[in-house]
Image (spheres, helix red, strand yellow):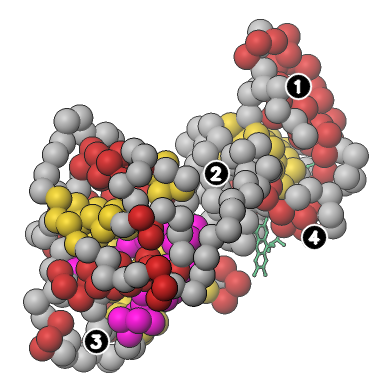
Amino acid sequence: MEAHQAESQSPMVSRASAKKELPRHFRDNRHVWVFIELERGQVHPVSIELLGEGRKLADKLGVQLAGVVIGTAEGLGVRSAIAEAFAYGADLAYLVESPLLSDYRNEPFTKALSDLVILHKPEILLLGATSLGRDLAGSVATTLETGLTADCTELDVDADGSLAATRPTFGGSLLCTIYTLNSRPQMATVRPRVMATPKRVTHAIGPIIRHDLMMIEEEIVTKVLGFLPDERSEKINLAYADIVVAGGLGIGTAENLERVMLLARTIGGEFGCSRPLVQKGWMEVDRQIGQTGQTIRPKLYLAAGISGAVQHRVGVEGADLIVAINTDSNAPIFDFAHVAVVADAIGLLPALTAAFTRRIPPHNQSMQVN
Ligand SMILES: Cc1cc2nc3c(=O)[nH]c(=O)nc-3n(C[C@H](O)[C@H](O)[C@H](O)COP(=O)(O)OP(=O)(O)OC[C@H]3O[C@@H](n4cnc5c(N)ncnc54)[C@H](O)[C@@H]3O)c2cc1C
């Protein structure tokens, strides 16, 4: 395994200095695979986003896109995962079904995915950078002794067909493009919402290739004794919210954050914050936006008292409309905001809330502030 880092701007120039022949036994590896993650029987949206990205890579390489589904025949989970894979662009699906795969456990999932890879030889394998995806990707990469680039923000293929996986490095101050030069598959994980959701194709179908999990329960050390849902996970849905209002240090005090929350509730959105507010204990970590927090892609992002440091920017630049309120007309956030408001956010937020309250019927205002 060898991963080579290069400046993202000129991958071809820097690759030349590290060029290596791909070992002969990897030269037959073809096709792009996306692992379709099931979360309590539901397809995780990041898998759909990756199918969109995988489709683009497959088209550039002139190969097929496959969805990989691993789970149990009980319930509708794997059926809907296969249907979703085809509906979002897959040409074929691989399926490993077994009662042992009803809950995620590292050992059987690693075996299922690694065996599939060894048998069918994909060139590129993409997984969501979720808790499950990170766990699985790491163990599959080490089992197969191949390269894995985690938390990518951009995926592309370069002129000689290699996967160019770009991700932030050095605390987000640089972007680096990483290549897996002499092993296959080239693996990458991508966080939810980093890639756009592709358009759904209706009634798409394709071949399903089944594979048996060659494992028995006695071989699996991990046992699932029960499932305790995280009670907060249903409440905070920052990554998939259409409207997000966030506060930064410019808000001044923890009490002033109520103004951010009220505006978010009034316009039917979620609220979030920059990292220092989490570090001060003013907001829970699930509401942090940015490189080490959530990546969001709302229709409207309203940032109040946030300077726009690069680590924050990478988490919000997929928003359709960014409105920034800042007292400093030279604040970096104004370099990428679509609407710049030079004003005191502490005074402006309640004024905006009052103005929206007059215009938006109460039943359209969100009731979820906690
Ligand atoms: C490895 C690493 C990871 C990181 N990850 C993240 C991350 O995920 N998310 C994140 O957000 N940060 C992250 N950071 C921190 C990041 O570098 C910045 O320090 C942080 O984003 C700054 O937060 P801020 O904009 O709220 O505060 P500041 O940078 O202090 O900005 C406050 C802004 O408020 C303005 N202001 C002041 N008073 C008012 C007012 N009354 N009305 C309006 N505006 C006002 C100021 O002009 C200023 O622009 C990370 C840093 C590192 C090193």
Residue 27 position within the rendered picture, expressed as x and y whole percent measured from the top left = 11, 80
Are the two marked residues, 1 and 3, in contact with CB atoms closer than 8 angstroms? no
Distance CA(mark 2)–CA(mark 1):
23 Å
Residue 166 position within the rendered picture, expressed as x and y whole percent measured from the top left = 39, 68
Residue for badge 4? 279
Of callouts 2 and 1, the N-terminal one? 2
Which class describes the residues within 10 Å of circle 2: few (<14), some (14-19), or many (20+)?
many
Dot 4: what SS? helix
Q: Residue 353: which numbered mark, if any? A: 1
Using the rendered view, name the quadrant where residue 235 is placed.
top right
Q: Is mark 4 within 8 Å of ligand 1?
A: no
Identify the residue at horizontal 59%, vertical 53% (top origin).
226
Of callouts 3 and 4, the N-terminal one? 3
* Count of labels in the image: 4
Identify the residue at horizontal 25%, vertical 44% (top origin).
82
Of callouts 4 and 1, the N-terminal one? 4
Start-end of magenta stretch:
122-151
Residue 277 shows in this picture: yes
Are the two marked residues, 2 and 4, in contact with CB atoms closer than 8 angstroms? no
Identify the residue at horizontal 42%, vertical 41% (top origin).
42
As rendered, which of 108 and 272 lies closer to the eye? Answer: 108
Residue for badge 3? 182
The type of residue carrying mark 3 is Asn
Q: Residue 239: which numbered mark, if any? A: 2
Q: Is residue 237 above or below residue 292?
A: above
